[in-house]
Image (tube, grey):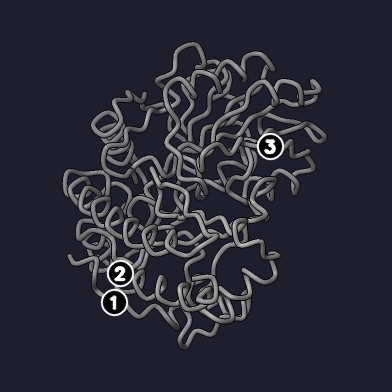
Amino acid sequence: MSFDEIIDRRGTHSVKWDMMEKIYGVPAEGGLPMWVADMDFRPPACVQGAVEKMAAHGVYGYYGDDSGYTDAIRWWMAERHGWQVEAGAVFTTHGLVNGTALCVDAFTAPGDGVVLMTPVYHAFARVIKAAGREVVECALALKDGRYEMDFDAWDAQMTGSETMLVLCSPHNPGGRVWSRAELEGVAAFAERHDLVLVSDEIHHDLLMPGQAHVPMALIEGIEDRLVMMTATTKTFNIAGSHTGNVIIADEALRAKFAQRMAAMGLSPNSFGLFMAEAAYSPDGAAWVDELCAYLDGNRKVFDEGINAIPGLASMPLEATYLSWVDFAGTGMAKAEFAGRVEKTAKIAVNHGETFGKGGESFLRFNIATPRARVVEAVERMQAAFGDLQ
């Protein structure tokens, strides 16, 4: 397939395309949506083929015997991430926001503190607050234009009311691939403060060349408090299937999670299971390799163009397709720089403050779109901030 193909998604019930005018005032006609984290690419042919096979059969009954699905997950994690997953450790949830919410429900109590390293994916705070828990924001340190962990500051913040830490690895929105030493630091922090550690690794396949992701499951001594979360949805652009996996090695944690799943009567969507099994395959792996090379090209075009605008700084992207751009150097108030992006450039983007402390001067741009659109976005941005040149 060609990632350069322009696919018209307008009028298809696409949140990204069909809601940008209502939410951001950016018109569907002439606007560029660079907010919601899905891609403007079709999934690999193996995934499309699985859906077409279902449609050809024409009967959409209850799904049974998930051994092939589980085997595909286990194969992928071993082959791509060097991580051996036990078959009985895998739970399938309605996506990973649902997975996060279930973890909060299973492993914390109302009023407990749940630690987030901010700025971080906004849905975490949303589900934590909705569950009546307290969001504890531990701010990442911004050093030389990239995020680093600040365990000394975070240790000082803890009150003893915290019972869970949600880690985003690789990091959204900063695009960091955490090093093994950093992950060991996270594990030690969770142990010091007796926190259940939920590691959301949904972006773990979307790495820039030369980067290597370390699954938290490979960090020693953390198994008794670790919950891993992975999905095919970001990797293969099938987020509408709402299928994710919560993977728990520890039997006591596993039993607690299984009890909450049973209490809520949750079972997965068969479309998502067929798509995921097809995706986690050699054909899917070859497609991901091509995708990552293409995204790296988009990253170079975007960063070169954005960093050429005085006062703007695009954080170096190590993983994900989400560019995190700092406007602090412009000296502009948020209303002005966001207004220029949305009203002048007609680009819909995520606002940084929704990601928590430290995000106030940033906007998040989704660059997983045909390169011609990335080039156009850069040109629009350079025109919108032309007076700074």
Which residue is denoted by mark 2 in the rendering?
370
Separation of marks 2 and 3 at Cα, in angstroms:
39 Å
How packed mark 1 is, by other alpha carbons closer than 10 Å (few <14, some 14-19, many 20 or more), is: some
What secondary structure is found at the residue carrying circle 3?
helix
Of pointers 1 and 3, the one earlier in the residue sequence: 1
Asked if residue 313 lies left or right of residue 195, the reply is left
What residue lies at 32% left-to-right and 23% top-to-bottom? 84
Q: CA distance from mark 1 to mark 3?
A: 42 Å
**Residue sticking out furthest to the top:** 221
In the picture, residue 236 is in which quadrant? Answer: bottom left
Query: Is the residue marked by circle 3 packed among few (<14), some (14-19), or many (20+) residues within 10 Å?
Result: many
* Label whose residue precedes the other's in the sequence (2 or 3): 3
Question: Is residue 24 rendered to the left or right of residue 89?
Answer: right
Label 2 Cα crowd, 10 Å radius (few <14 / some 14-19 / many 20+): many
All told, the count of numbered labels is 3
Q: Which mark is residue 105?
A: 3
Looking at the image, residue 54 sits to the left or right of residue 109; the answer is: left
Identify the residue at horizontal 42%, vertical 27% (top origin). Answer: 179
Q: Position of residue 18 (x, y in %)?
A: 51, 78
Q: Nearer the viewer, residue 26 or 254?
A: 26
Q: Amino acid at mark 1?
A: Ile
Q: Are marks 2 and 1 in contact (CB under 8 Å)?
A: yes
Which part of the image, by quadrant, shows the N terminus?
A: bottom left
| Badge number at residue 6 | 1
- Of circles 1 and 3, which is in front? 1
State if disc 3 and disc 1 touch (CB < 8 Å): no
**Alpha carbons under labels 2 and 1: distance apart:** 6 Å
Indicate whether 241 appears above or below 99: below
> Horizontal and vertical percent for residue 151?
63, 23
